[in-house]
Image (spheres, helix red, strand yellow):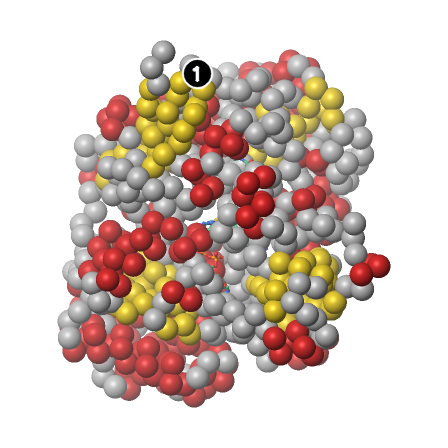
């Protein structure tokens, strides 16, 4: 048979959400390529996803249901039939639910971003069951909450226009690793004369290619942004008309910014005062005096600290002060997901909850370690008796993972994991259920870095006995006696339910047209906030937020210092003087792909980048094995002595599978379960450690 090409979508948690063309020959996917016609993808894929077939046909795919035979965490399983597995799971969940369904917790994140495999049948199942709700905070909720208060939703400029910007500020992001298709456009902007600036404590792959790199200590961006606002006001680099017509709370913002003269911010951030003056001057002059487009690509790296939400609010105020929104190539983007009209109610059916509209308790995924170790007497609801994990690998990705692993190792916990592979989490499961990959199922996708809906048509039959998440929950629902018609919806039906077609942004877009064409752009204007019209209660950009005041938060953008920094925790900093961050490695996607040999080979082994002065003070030489530690845990890594890490900072690119690391540990052994100022999100990059050389006889084998 001649090869055929199937239109698909990249399922991964990345702003680019690429349009794929899958070549299928004799029922096997032989190639995954980027769609040359999709304006974002432009025919190019990242190294990881161009290797997608290596992942799908990986020899270690879980292809039958597995039942645990060893200790929890040991990873010893036997194959069982689907009937055996589902019968026993349904019986166990029914027994727990009969006592208290809130003792059951679903745990999922963005292993696939698909609306069908990500949120539909599973959500219906757990709603009907009355299980605990999961607060999905592990990535973006501090920034998303801040945007909601400031702009009204996760909305921003369309990066297709960034090629025409004259200044591009990449703030807390590393697009070469984590937003590759934006980088292509930013380079085009550079060719057309734009100045590129990176704001990042680390000289990342991206920062080293920008014209200027400003390196604040982690968690200090709020002070930096407030000092920029100070300078814009001081030097009258303001779009007074835009401020008057399309913002609220300028006076309050001015008052706050006056507390942050550049010299103070320079001290807090550990950056030269000239850098702040230069950046604010360039930004304000280009936008206000020369009427040139200035763009900020903010990313999630900067909100993984205590003050992450307020920092996002401060940065998000900048484009409104200088009227950058007036031009399509100006403004700011953190996320575009709020533009997508999605029918979450139909997908998830919250009305199936037993006591709808009253809600069961909510468990925050970012503190799953503490939640699993809670004995049920602390007032936070019943002791957790069962966890069903899908689309996530919490033992590797959730903070303070010593506790997460301890929780998942509880012998009295019943754990089911739907997975492609035997991850660190799957090793703790009572049952591992084989899930299909993106090539083996149907889905529909929105994006958070662009404004296209995408279809994922099924390219090949499921491998082995793998089933889509939806089908696994459909079968479980049947066994639990759930008879609502929505439990019989096919994946095609669910895909067709996802888009709110009456919303004018979805004009002309339906599942039928999407699966034919592969992708379709939302109707969102080129400069969506040129005339204000922010989706806030006031319709304006809210420097001052009534809603925040009501929610007990500081209603004006503020600087909230990190939990763990010399200024806020001197005693802790005396013992653990180095700030550690663990942002994504280029060849991994969170913890996905770590087990693809060719990609892991490129990353080599876990590394820790440390400044030459900090290394010398500890007798650490380049290439030595080191141990980073604090009161929560430790991990080993190979030292790279480099001034990419500024003084006082160490960087361990992540997220390694623990069992593929030399000592069976990763960066999350060190991170804490404390939460951000808003959005209840984790503070992965707000983490003090000490580092020591590992004597060679103590090396983990
Ligand atoms: N290759 C690859 N791509 C990915 C991912 C991946 O794991 N691998 N993950 C995906 C996911 S889930 C997400 S959420 C995004 C994340 O991607 P980004 O939003 O780009 O965020 P991070 O990668 O967390 O961090 C980006 C940069 O922020 C810097 N940073 C850390 N702390 C601070 C700070 O306090 N202030 C400032 N200004 N900068 C700071 C880091 O040094 C890093 O270089 O990428 C997605 N894309
Ligand atoms: N130290 C540190 N920790 C971090 C971060 C960091 O920068 N540093 N980043 C954080 C961020 S931004 C995020 S988003 C989280 C990410 O955390 P997760 O969303 O848990 O992401 P992954 O680690 O990629 O795990 C996803 C799992 O889902 C599985 N999967 C994929 N598709 C399917 C499917 O269709 N069905 C089923 N059943 N399974 C599927 C994959 O095999 C994979 O094991 O990690 C967070 N943790
Ligand atoms: Mo994320």
Task: Between residue 130 and residue 3, name the one nearer to us.
Answer: 3
Rendering coords of residue 595 (x, y %) = 60, 39
Say whether residue 112 is left or right of residue 384. Answer: left
Secondary structure of residue under mark 1: loop
Quarter location, residue 173: bottom left
Quarter location, residue 494: top left
Mark 1 sits near ligand 2, with its Cβ under 8 Å away: no
Say whether residue 121 is left or right of residue 339. Answer: right
Task: Between residue 622 and residue 436, name the one nearer to us.
Answer: 622
Rendering coords of residue 95 (x, y %) = 70, 25
Relative to 201, say whether 426 is above or below: above
Q: Residue at x 34, y 30 (%)?
A: 21
Q: Residues within 10 Å of mark 1 (few under 14, many from 20)?
A: few
Rendering coords of residue 577 (x, y %) = 66, 75
Rendering coords of residue 49 (x, y %) = 44, 39
Relative to 351, say whether 680 is above or below: below
The residue to which callout 1 is attached is 27
Task: Between residue 685 and residue 408, name the one nearer to us.
Answer: 685
Q: Residue at x 78, y 53 (%)?
A: 700
Q: Residue at x 27, y 77 (%)?
A: 282
Task: Between residue 555 and residue 371, name the one nearer to us.
Answer: 371
Classify the position of the N terminus by image quarter.
Answer: top left
């Amino acid at each position: 048979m001649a090869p055929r090409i199937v239109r698909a979508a990249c399922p991964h948690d990345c702003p680019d959400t690429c349009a794929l063309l899958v070549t299928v020959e004799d029922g096997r996917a032989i190639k995954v390529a980027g769609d040359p016609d999709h304006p974002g993808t432009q025919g190019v894929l990242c190294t990881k996803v161009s290797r997608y077939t290596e992942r799908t046909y990986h020899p270690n795919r879980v292809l039958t249901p597995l039942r645990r035979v060893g200790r929890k965490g040991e990873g010893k399983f036997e194959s069982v039939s689907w009937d055996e597995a589902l019968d026993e799971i349904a019986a166990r969940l029914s027994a727990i639910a009969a006592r208290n369904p809130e003792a059951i917790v679903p745990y999922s994140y963005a292993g696939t971003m698909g609306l069908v495999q990500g949120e539909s049948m599973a959500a219906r199942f757990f709603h009907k069951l009355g299980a605990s709700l999961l607060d999905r905070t592990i990535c973006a909720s501090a920034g998303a909450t801040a945007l909601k208060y400031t702009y009204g939703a996760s909305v921003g400029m369309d990066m297709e226009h960034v090629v025409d910007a004259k200044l591009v500020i990449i703030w807390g992001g590393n697009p070469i690793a984590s937003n590759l298709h934006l980088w292509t456009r930013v380079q085009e902007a550079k060719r057309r004369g734009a100045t590129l600036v990176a704001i990042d404590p680390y000289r990342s792959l991206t920062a080293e290619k920008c014209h200027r790199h400003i390196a604040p200590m982690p968690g200090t961006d709020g002070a930096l942004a407030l000092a920029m606002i100070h300078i814009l006001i001081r030097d009258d680099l303001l779009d007074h008309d835009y401020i008057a017509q399309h913002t609220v709370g300028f006076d309050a913002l001015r008052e706050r910014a006056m507390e942050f003269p550049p010299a103070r911010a320079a001290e807090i951030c550990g950056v030269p005062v000239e850098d702040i003056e230069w950046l604010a001057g360039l930004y304000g002059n280009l936008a206000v005096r020369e009427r040139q487009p200035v763009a900020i690509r903010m990313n999630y790296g900067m909100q993984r600290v205590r003050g992450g939400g307020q920092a996002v609010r401060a940065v998000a105020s900048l484009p409104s002060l200088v009227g950058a929104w007036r031009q399509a190539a100006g403004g700011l983007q953190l996320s575009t997901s709020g533009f997508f009209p999605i029918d979450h109610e139909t997908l998830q059916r919250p009305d199936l909850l037993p006591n709808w509209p009253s809600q069961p308790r909510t468990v925050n995924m970012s503190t799953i370690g503490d939640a699993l170790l809670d004995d049920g007497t602390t007032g936070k609801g019943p002791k957790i008796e069962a966890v069903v994990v899908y689309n996530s690998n919490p033992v590797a990705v959730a903070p303070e993972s010593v506790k997460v692993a301890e929780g998942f190792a509880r012998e009295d916990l019943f754990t089911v994991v739907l997975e492609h592979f035997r991850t660190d989490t799957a090793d703790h499961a009572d049952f591992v259920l084989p899930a299909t990959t993106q090539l083996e199922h149907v889905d529909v996708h929105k994006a958070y870095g662009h404004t296209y809906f995408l279809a994922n048509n099924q390219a090949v039959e499921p491998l082995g006995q793998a089933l889509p998440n939806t089908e696994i929950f459909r079968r479980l629902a049947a066994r639990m006696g759930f008879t609502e018609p929505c439990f019989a919806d096919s994946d095609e039906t669910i895909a067709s339910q996802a888009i709110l077609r009456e919303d004018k942004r979805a004009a002309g877009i339906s599942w039928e047209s999407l699966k034919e064409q592969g992708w379709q752009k939302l109707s969102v204007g080129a400069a969506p906030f040129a005339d204000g019209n922010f989706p806030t209660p006031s319709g304006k950009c809210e420097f001052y937020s009534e809603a925040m005041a009501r929610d007990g938060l500081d209603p004006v953008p503020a600087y909230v210092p990190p939990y763990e920094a010399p200024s806020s925790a001197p005693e802790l900093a005396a013992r653990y003087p180095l700030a550690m961050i663990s942002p994504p490695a280029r060849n991994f996607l969170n913890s996905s792909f770590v087990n693809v040999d060719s990609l892991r080979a490129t990353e080599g082994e876990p590394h820790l980048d440390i400044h030459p002065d900090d290394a010398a003070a500890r007798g650490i030489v380049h290439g030595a094995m080191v141990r980073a530690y604090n009161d929560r845990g430790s991990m080993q890594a190979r030292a790279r002595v480099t001034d990419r890490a500024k003084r006082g900072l160490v960087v361990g690119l992540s997220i390694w599978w623990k069992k593929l690391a030399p000592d069976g540990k990763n960066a999350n052994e060190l991170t804490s379960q404390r939460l951000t100022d808003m959005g209840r999100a984790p503070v992965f990059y707000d983490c003090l450690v000490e580092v020591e050389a590992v004597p060679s006889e103590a090396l983990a084998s």
